């Protein structure tokens, strides 16, 4: 193969490195790296715009204090972290965690674990009611080990950095 064959790949890599360097200088985050099992591993990019958040959207957010305490104590994530999760409940949705399954709008949506993957006890977040304006429920129900709203409750809109999408998976 010749040098010309690799030129698009090299230019893409240089552009990608520039994008990472540029976004790290800005106060706002635009690129996020996911190294957990909840979502595909790789880089995610913030979607520009202020469209309303809806079910199924992937979001990046600063964890609520209830989550931050557990994450820090158990060292689930490296320092200076953000959580990347799917929105599974929006304002007005009915949430019930009083049974063996997470129930959203009267439909079983996901299971609760009694222990994390290290074997330490973990408690579900106790909640039964409707999400208020500015509250979102996050989760990856198909991933049993996902640390999400099942264990720390709703996420406030003020904690949400923005919608994201997968940029580069590995």
Image (cartoon, grey):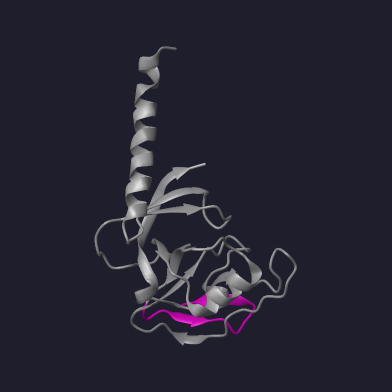
Closer to the camera in the image, 26 or 143: 26
Counting from the top left corner in percent of width and height, residue 54 is at 35, 67
Q: Residue at x 36, y 66 (%)?
A: 161
Closer to the camera in the image, 83 or 134: 83
Which quadrant holds residue 4?
top left
Counting from the top left corner in percent of width and height, residue 141 is at 55, 65
| Residue 18 makes an appearance in the image | yes
Q: Residue furthest front?
A: 25
Numbered marks: total: 0
Q: Residue at x 53, y 63 (%)?
A: 79
- In the image, taking residue 5 as reference, residue 66 lies left or right, namely right
Counting from the top left corner in percent of width and height, residue 145 is at 63, 63
Q: Residue furthest right?
A: 119
- In the image, taking residue 66 as reference, residue 57 lies left or right, namely left
The answer to if 136 sits in the magenta stretch is: no
- In the image, taking residue 95 as reference, residue 57 lies left or right, namely left
Which quadrant holds residue 151?
bottom right
Counting from the top left corner in percent of width and height, residue 15 is at 33, 37
From what the image shows, is residue 129 above or below residue 105?
Answer: below
Magenta-tinted stretch: 91-106
Q: Residue at x 36, y 79 (%)?
A: 91
- In the image, taking residue 155 as reference, residue 76 lies left or right, namely right
The answer to if 96 sits in the magenta stretch is: yes
| Residue 106 makes an appearance in the image | no
The quarter of the picture where the N terminus appears is top left
């Amino acid at each position: 193969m010749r040098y010309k064959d690799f030129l698009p790949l090299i230019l893409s890599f240089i552009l990608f490195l520039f994008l990472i360097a540029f976004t790290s200088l800005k106060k706002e985050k635009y690129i996020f790296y996911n190294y957990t099992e909840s979502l595909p591993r790789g880089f995610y990019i913030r979607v520009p715009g202020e469209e309303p958040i809806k079910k199924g959207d992937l979001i990046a957010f600063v964890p609520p204090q209830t989550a931050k305490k557990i994450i820090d104590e158990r060292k689930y994530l490296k320092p200076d972290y953000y959580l990347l999760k799917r929105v599974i409940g929006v304002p007005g949705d009915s949430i019930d965690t009083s049974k063996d399954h997470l129930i959203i709008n009267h439909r079983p949506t996901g299971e609760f674990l009694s222990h994390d993957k290290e074997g330490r006890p973990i408690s579900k977040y106790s909640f039964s009611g409707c999400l208020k304006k500015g509250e979102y429920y996050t989760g990856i129900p198909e991933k049993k080990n996902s640390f999400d709203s099942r264990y720390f409750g709703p996420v406030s809109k003020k904690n949400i950095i923005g919608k994201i999408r997968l940029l580069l998976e590995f």
